């Protein structure tokens, strides 16, 4: 029995969460869900976007499923990452059949440092403009590089690439690169290299098959992972994991999509794939593959899929179809 915090949030976050929980019911795993409030709607009622109670519920759980927040996203998801020290942002870039993926054979992952870099938000006005502080510590670099190598080893990946701009940012990215090669010494069987972020941005479009695991700092990781999302068919399909020492928080990359909210048209795939990542995190690999394969079946048939996948089905119809495929297999 796993203790799972569930934060549906706002807009289509609630819809894709309902769809995903409906599918998870038929897996051979017992979840003890603790539902928690956060987001715009909750803030309208109470004046607070992320109550302490929700933070406590997540802290007391093994994993958290998060739908999406609206305008309060920074106060909710960014704050949760900090409160729980979720220092890894894991973004798989994988092409699935029946989608608008530009390539049909992509499967790599971006491991983004989630706690420092330019995103600590220390900006200051100066006489003539403003400055932002970019913080790179040896500790944070070491733990993210270690995570990347451990993850690569565990998932049978062959290569880890560090992405940086150490030729210009000689001190900050210099440290990141140095620590990467130091950590790599513990993984002599792993292929490795390092690349500049600008060249990486180009190679992601011209030769993305060259990547397996990319490890990088916060802002570069944010930008490159959106580029990765663009390569494999857009927001309705892209999951993510935020991982710390004690918990994992799993969420689609998309937001609350207010224009789609309440219409039942949102694609549940990104949330379903986030649940797949949660199952892998909980070491429930067999169930993870079953769920992923049921989704792949529905995507490749292309019959019961949402509008963004050129279908006409609703969020819940697509969810019921995924659930039916799962039940057929059981
Ligand atoms: P968004 O991801 O909510 O939507 C952008 C567009 O992507 C939508 O209009 C829709 O065309 C498409 N889309 C996204 N998810 C889809 C799905 N499941 N199925 C089909 N199409 C989908 O981003 P936007 O419009 O920039 O932001 C809307 C709100 O969401 C804002 O208030 C923003 O702050 C919040 N947000 C929250 C995030 C989070 O909670 N992690 C992340 C990003 C945005
Ligand atoms: Mg982003």
Image (spheres, rainbow, N blue to C red):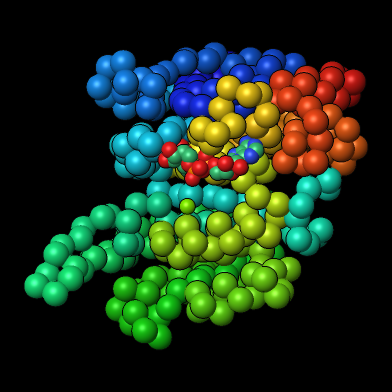
Q: Is residue 260 visible?
A: yes
* Occupied quadrant, residue 121: bottom left
* Occupied quadrant, residue 132: bottom left
Picture residue at 57% right of the left edge, 72% below the top: 201
Residue at the extreme bottom of the image, as rendered:
167
Residue 57 in the image, given as x and y percentages of width and height: 38, 20
Tell me the quadrant of the picture where the C terminus can be found. Answer: top right
Q: Nearer the viewer, residue 291 or 254?
A: 254
- Decide if residue 183 is on the left or right side of residue 171: right
Residue at the extreme front of the image, as rendered:
259
Q: Is residue 251 visible?
A: no
Q: How many marks do you count on the picture?
A: 0
Picture residue at 80% right of the left edge, 41% below the top: 310
- Decide if residue 188 is on the left or right side of residue 5: right
Residue 88 in the image, given as x and y percentages of width and height: 46, 49
Q: Is residue 133 above or below residue 294?
A: below
Picture residue at 52% right of the left edge, 15% below the top: 33
Residue 265 in the image, given as x and y percentages of width and height: 68, 29
- Decide if residue 295 is on the left or right side of residue 72: right
Residue at the extreme left of the image, as rendered:
127
Tell me the quadrant of the picture where the N terminus can be found. Answer: top right
Q: Is residue 105 above or below residue 322?
A: below
* Occupied quadrant, residue 317: top right
Picture residue at 31% right of the left edge, 15% below the top: 45
Residue 117 in the image, given as x and y percentages of width and height: 33, 62
Q: Nearer the viewer, residue 111 or 310?
A: 310
């Amino acid at each position: 029995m796993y203790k799972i915090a569930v934060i549906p949030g706002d807009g289509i976050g609630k819809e894709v969460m309902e769809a995903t929980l409906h599918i998870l019911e038929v897996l051979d795993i017992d979840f003890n869900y603790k539902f928690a409030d956060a987001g715009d709607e909750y803030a309208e009622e109470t004046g607070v976007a992320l109550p302490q109670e929700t933070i406590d519920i997540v802290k007391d759980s093994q994993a958290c499923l998060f739908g999406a927040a609206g305008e309060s996203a920074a106060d909710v998801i960014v704050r949760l990452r900090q409160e729980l020290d979720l220092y890894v942002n894991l973004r798989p870039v994988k092409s699935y059949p029946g989608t608008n993926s530009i390539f049909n054979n992509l499967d790599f992952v971006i491991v983004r440092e989630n706690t420092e870099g330019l995103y600590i938000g220390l900006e200051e006005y100066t006489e003539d403009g403003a400055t932002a502080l970019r913080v790179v510590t040896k500790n944070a670099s070491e733990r993210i590089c270690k995570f990347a190598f451990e993850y690569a080893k565990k998932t049978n990946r062959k290569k880890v690439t560090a992405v940086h701009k150490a030729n210009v940012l000689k001190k900050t990215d210099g440290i990141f690169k140095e620590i990467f090669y130091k950590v790599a010494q513990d993984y002599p069987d792993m292929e490795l290299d390092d690349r500049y972020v600008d060249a990486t941005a180009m190679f992601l479009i011209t030769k993305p098959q060259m990547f397996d695991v990319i490890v990088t700092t916060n802002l570069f990781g944010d930008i490159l992972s959106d580029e990765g999302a663009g390569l494999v068919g857009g927001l309705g399909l892209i999951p993510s994991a935020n991982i710390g020492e004690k918990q994992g928080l799993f969420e689609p990359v998309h937001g609350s999509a207010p224009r789609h909210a309440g219409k039942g048209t949102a694609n549940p795939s990104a949330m379903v794939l986030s649940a797949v990542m949660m199952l892998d995190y909980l070491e429930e690999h067999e169930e993870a593959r079953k769920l992923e394969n049921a989704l792949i079946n529905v995507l490749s048939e292309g019959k019961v899929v949402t509008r963004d996948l050129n279908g006409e089905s609703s969020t819940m119809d697509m969810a019921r179809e995924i659930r039916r495929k799962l039940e057929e297999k059981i």
